[in-house]
């Protein structure tokens, strides 16, 4: 039986409401899911079933996203993540998707968090530079102009067709995708200095020394595949390949992703002597 609840974690400027799904009284592992840009914690609804496997599944809305009342600020999210991980039971494995993966990797590299492991899907390795096809880039300036002028529908239509959103979904499924980012208000685009600032963390990532798994859809963009490959080269990370999946393969192919995440977490737990099944 799985139970759900919410805990309030005090952070700078307020609190973060963390939703907890648990199927165990004394879980050995907490899987903290960190959502990507324009999304919110509901983008991990299909991962809640993992709580039936003797682990906690925790989700929350990042600053400026979903129902969070906190002002967006990527830099302050490092401390947010630190406080949330310390509020969870057992060993904490952080599962980040897209910008959430970038945040998780940056927090670990800078020592803000000390997770038992990292799962990185569609992430960005700070400091690594690779060629990005024009259709793969995110037109932040265009999207900022859309929100500044109130043309939210124009943003939603354009973003919904972007390969970072649409790849891996059938035509019928694509029509439902906007529900996952329909609550995005563009606050981080309109707030000065809210977006991630560039830095080079490749040398720190190389020295992490913790278990890491990348989740890579076969239809992931070329640039994000390259970032995953570089993370693997630097850290020896394991790769979970999701055939037919794109950037958001945890939504398009949840059974494959959930099975891979569960197996990998069980291995991490077993090596630590926790015995998660």
Image (cartoon, rainbow, N blue to C red):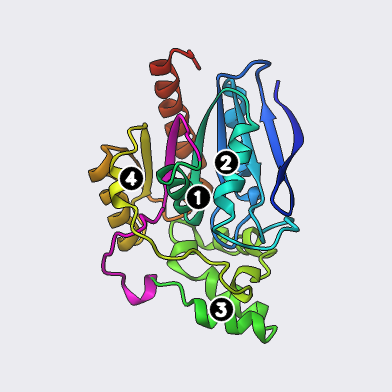
Given residues 74 and 29, the one toward you in this image is 74
Given residues 250 and 231, the one toward you in this image is 231
In the image, residue 1 sits, relative to residue 106, either above or below, namely: above
Q: Provide the residue designation for mark 3.
A: 143
Q: Provide the residue designation for mark 1.
A: 252
Q: Does the magenta-highlighted stretch encompass residue 115?
A: yes
The residue depicted at 76 percent of the width and 33 percent of the height is: 5
Q: CA distance from mark 4 to mark 1?
A: 29 Å
Q: Which residues are magenta?
A: 113-136
> What is the x, y in percent for residue 95?
50, 41
Residues at discs 2 and 4 in contact (Cβ within 8 Å): no
In the image, residue 28 sits, relative to residue 86, either above or below, namely: above
Q: Residues within 10 Å of mark 2 (few under 14, many from 20)?
A: some
> What is the x, y in percent for residue 207?
30, 39
Left or right: residue 225 versus residue 79 is: left
* Residue 184, picture quadrant: bottom right
Q: Provide the residue designation for mark 4.
A: 205
Q: Provide the residue designation for mark 2.
A: 82
Left or right: residue 215 versus residue 104 is: left
Q: CA distance from mark 1 to mark 2?
A: 30 Å
Indicate which disc, 3 or 4, sits on the residue closer to the N terminus: 3
Q: Residues within 10 Å of mark 3 (few under 14, many from 20)?
A: many
């Amino acid at each position: 039986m799985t139970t759900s609840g919410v805990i309030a974690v005090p952070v700078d400027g307020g609190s973060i409401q963390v939703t907890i799904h648990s199927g165990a009284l004394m879980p050995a592992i907490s899987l903290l899911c960190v959502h990507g840009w324009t999304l919110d914690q509901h983008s991990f609804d299909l991962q809640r079933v993992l709580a039936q496997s003797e682990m906690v599944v925790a989700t929350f809305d990042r600053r400026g996203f979903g129902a969070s009342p906190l002002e967006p600020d990527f830099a302050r999210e490092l401390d947010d993540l630190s406080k949330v991980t310390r509020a969870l039971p057992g060993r904490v494995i952080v599962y980040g998707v897209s910008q959430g993966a970038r945040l998780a990797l940056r927090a670990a590299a800078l020592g803000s968090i000390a997770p038992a492991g990292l799962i990185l899907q569609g992430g960005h390795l700070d400091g690594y530079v690779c060629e990005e096809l024009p259709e793969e880039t995110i037109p932040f300036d265009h999207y900022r102009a859309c929100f500044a002028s109130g043309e939210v529908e124009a943003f939603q239509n354009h973003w919904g067709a972007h390969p970072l959103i649409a790849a891996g979904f059938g035509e019928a499924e694509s029509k439902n995708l906007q529900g996952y980012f329909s609550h995005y208000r563009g606050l981080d685009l309109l707030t000065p200095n809210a977006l991630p600032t560039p830095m080079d963390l490749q040398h720190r990532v190389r020295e992490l020394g913790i278990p890491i798994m990348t989740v890579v859809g076969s239809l992931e963009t070329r640039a994000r595949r390259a970032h995953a490959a570089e993370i693997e080269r630097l850290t020896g990370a394991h790769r979970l390949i999701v055939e037919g999946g794109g950037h958001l393969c945890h939504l398009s192919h949840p059974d494959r992703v959930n099975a891979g995440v569960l197996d990998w977490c069980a291995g991490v737990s077993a090596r630590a002597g926790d015995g998660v099944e």
